[in-house]
Image (tube, grey):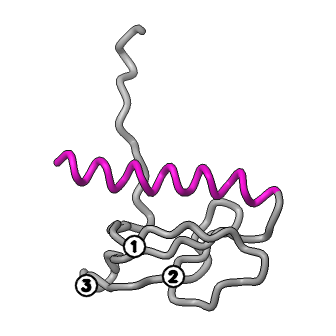
Amino acid sequence: MHRKLAVVSLIAAALVVGAAAQQASNAVVIRAGRMLDVKTGKLLTDQTIVVERERIVSVGAVIPAGAKVIDLPSATVLPGMIDVHTHLTMEP
């Protein structure tokens, strides 16, 4: 369970870093060691994920010129997953 949370957190962090980096370039590329294809259920290896404006625009594409590259060779990414965990009734 902790490992899954770590993977989702890693993806969220990469997208936040990517959103900030997009100010300087057109795209952020995440090179992942493994990626779950949520349509087929297959675990793919050595995947390139292109993110533009906080959206995944392609998988397995060539790295665009000027893109910021985030290397995650030992990570498993789950495209499309977001962290929806919150405690609305708790006070800090």
- The residue at the far top in this view is 91
**Number of on-image labels:** 3
- Residues drawn in magenta: 1-23
Residue at the spot 31% in from the left edge and 49% down from the top edge: 6
Q: Which of marks 3 and 1 is in front?
A: 1
Q: Mark 3 points at which residue?
A: 42
Give amino acid for label 2. Answer: Thr
Residue 12 is covered by the magenta coloring: yes
**Image-quadrant location for residue 84:** top left
- Label 2 – label 3 distance at C-alpha: 16 Å
Residue 9 is covered by the magenta coloring: yes
- Label 3 – label 1 distance at C-alpha: 18 Å
Q: Earlier in the sequence, mark 2 or mark 3?
A: 3
Query: Residue 68 location in percent, x, y?
Result: 68, 68
- Label 1 – label 2 distance at C-alpha: 11 Å
Query: Residue 73 location in percent, x, y?
Result: 39, 73
Residue at the spot 43% in from the left edge and 74% down from the top edge: 32
- The residue at the far left in this view is 1
Q: Mark 2 points at which residue?
A: 48
Give amino acid for label 3. Answer: Lys
What element does badge 3 sit on? Answer: loop
Give amino acid for label 1. Answer: Pro
Residue at the spot 36% in from the left edge and 15% down from the top edge: 89
Determine if residue 38 is in view.
no
From the image, which quarter does the C terminus lie in? top left
For residue 92, side relative to residue 44 (left or right): right
Q: Name the residue under label 1.
A: 73
Q: Which of marks 1 and 2 is nearer the N terminus?
A: 2
